[in-house]
């Protein structure tokens, strides 16, 4: 009976549901895997198979699944007031309390919060605010934006151009001419080697050169992820973020930290910027904000950004808004999730993150493991067939699907990047046993992959 239901779902999905960032034809051929339920760090599929979710959905279910108090908070809000617009000077309690709670916990003077529906529209909103800011300052010619190769900043038309991953550009007519990039720090494959100071100095020089080439009075903003997520979990050397922040301050360019993945305990603290000892001019977050239970994102503005926009607009409305900005149900969920984080989940995440990193480090002795990197509950294992030459897995192995499937068969969900990198972002609620299982199952997948004919052919 379950099988018949599943089969009909697979067929309906194939015919009607367009999946994000997928090969449409590849997905039709493979079919959907239907997830049915979840509790803690474990998800159950339609066939009853249980898996540890080592990726917390899409690095978003930071609190883990199945928190009744979150369900209650949402249901209670829906019963009382399922919607309240923020237009016309109206509002509701939950988003107001959430904005205040976030402002209190954010770095420095990031005190003003505009709520979105997710990360992409948070990033997109920053373009509008940044442009408006420079208009308000009487410098409308500052309309050039810089980001970092391998970076991901969402999938709106403009965000996709700031994103520096070819799959988001090809066939879409982006990036635009005003969207510039500097090299990634990517320590493992940096042509300058892996000395931290060398890489920091080179990135500082490159950012300065890029600004000079564009024109110092034309650059509006610089965007970074504290750890580059979708590019393959690339951790900058300690001090890199701060150095880039300092250059932006010196050159008078707005610095924007995209904390959509790194926020809410993913790397340990509530925001990774705090750990880097910086205060961005603007900051974006989403995902862990509501732990993925409902959609929500946020743009944080520092006092000077907010005041400049406010004074520039005067009595005029700042013409940026979404129907669902500051949605009360999302805000009620976010408030309850925050209470859970601070009631122990952040602490558990720090403990579990240390165990995860130590466990993954223990895989370094495996013939296929070239690099292990991460911070807290955000990590990656990069596979190679030659450790000295850092030779990536042959494309014939099809890491994105074959290695994902192999992990699935072991009862583990991990991100499997096309270039042969496993990405980890487990829920912060993981037990020691679950962390150990993530590591052990990864080792099994590595051992099985060593038996692939495509791998054996290149290994000797
Ligand atoms: N920015 C970063 C750094 C992200 O990692 C993501 C999503 O993974 C986004 C923006 C886009 O967020 P969303 O998928 O919620 O639109």
Image (cartoon, rainbow, N blue to C red):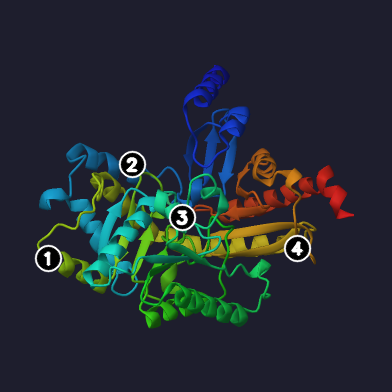
315 or 225, which is in the foreground? Answer: 315
Q: Position of residue 272 (x, y in %)?
A: 44, 68
37 or 140, which is in the foreground? Answer: 140
Q: Position of residue 392 (x, y in %)?
A: 74, 56
Where residue 314 is drawn, which disc sits there?
Answer: 1
Q: CA distance from mark 4 to mark 2?
A: 47 Å
Where residue 390 is drawn, which disc sits there?
Answer: 4
Task: Tell me if the residue at label 4 has its CB under 8 Å from ligand 1.
Answer: no
Instruction: Classify mark 4: helix, strand or loop.
Output: loop
In the displayed structure, does residue 426 sit left or right of residue 372? left
Quarter of the view holding residue 29: top right
Who comes first in sequence, dot 3 or dot 1? 3
Q: CA distance from mark 3 to mark 4?
A: 29 Å
Q: CA distance from mark 1 to mark 4?
A: 57 Å
Q: CA distance from mark 3 to mark 1?
A: 32 Å
Q: Which residue is mark 2?
A: 71
Who comes first in sequence, dot 2 or dot 3? 2
Tag nearer the camera, 1 or 2: 1
Tag nearer the camera, 1 or 4: 1
Tag nearer the camera, 2 or 3: 3
- Position of the C terminus by quadrant: bottom right
Let me know if residue 270 appears in the view. no
Residue sitting at the far right: 460
Q: Position of residue 283 (x, y in %)?
A: 36, 65
Where residue 160 is drawn, which disc sits there?
Answer: none
Where residue 161 is drawn, which disc sits there?
Answer: 3
């Amino acid at each position: 009976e379950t099988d018949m239901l599943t089969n009909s779902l697979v067929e309906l999905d194939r015919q009607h549901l367009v999946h994000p960032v997928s090969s449409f034809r590849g997905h039709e051929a493979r079919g959907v895997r239907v997830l049915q339920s979840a509790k803690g760090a474990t998800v159950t599929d339609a066939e009853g198979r249980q898996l540890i979710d080592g990726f917390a959905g899409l690095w978003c279910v930071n609190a883990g699944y199945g928190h009744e108090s979150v369900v209650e908070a949402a249901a209670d809000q829906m019963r009382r007031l399922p919607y309240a617009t923020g237009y016309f000077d109206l509002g509701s309690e939950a988003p107001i309390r959430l904005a205040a709670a976030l402002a209190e916990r954010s770095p420095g003077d990031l005190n003003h919060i505009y709520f979105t529906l997710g990360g992409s529209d948070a990033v997109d909103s920053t373009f509008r605010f940044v442009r408006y800011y420079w208009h308000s300052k009487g410098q409308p010619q500052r309309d050039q934006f810089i980001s970092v190769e391998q970076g991901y900043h969402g999938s709106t038309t403009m965000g996709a151009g700031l994103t520096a991953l070819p799959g988001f550009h090809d066939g879409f007519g982006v990036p635009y001419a005003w969207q510039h990039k500097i090299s990634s720090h990517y320590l493992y494959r940096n042509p300058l080697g892996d000395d931290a100071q060398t890489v920091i100095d080179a990135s500082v020089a490159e950012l300065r050169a890029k600004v000079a080439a564009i024109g110092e009075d034309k650059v509006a903003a610089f965007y970074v992820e504290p750890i580059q997520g979708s590019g393959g979990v690339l951790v900058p050397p300690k001090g890199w973020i701060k150095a880039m922040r300092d250059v932006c301050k010196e050159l008078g360019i707005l610095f924007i930290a995209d904390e959509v993945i790194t926020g809410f305990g993913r790397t340990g603290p509530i925001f990774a910027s705090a750990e880097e000892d910086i205060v961005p001019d603007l900051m974006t977050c989403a995902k862990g904000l509501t732990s993925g239970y409902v959609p929500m994102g946020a743009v944080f503005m520092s006092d000077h950004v907010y005041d400049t926009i406010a004074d520039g607009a005067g009595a005029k409305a700042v013409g940026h808004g979404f129907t669902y900005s500051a949605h009360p149900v999302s805000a009620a969920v976010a408030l309850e999730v925050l209470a859970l984080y601070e009631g122990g989940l952040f602490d558990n995440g720090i403990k579990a993150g240390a165990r995860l990193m130590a466990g993954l480090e223990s895989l370094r002795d495996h013939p296929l493991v070239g690099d292990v990197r991460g911070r807290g509950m955000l990590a990656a294992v990069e596979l190679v067939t030659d450790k000295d030459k850092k030779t990536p897995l042959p494309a014939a192995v099809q890491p994105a699907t074959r290695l994902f499937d192999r992990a699935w068969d072991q009862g583990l969900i991990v991100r499997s990047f096309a270039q042969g990198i496993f990405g980890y972002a487990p829920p912060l609620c993981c037990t020691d046993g679950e962390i150990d299982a993530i590591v052990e199952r990864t080792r099994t997948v590595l051992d099985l992959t060593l038996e692939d004919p495509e791998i054996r052919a290149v290994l000797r």
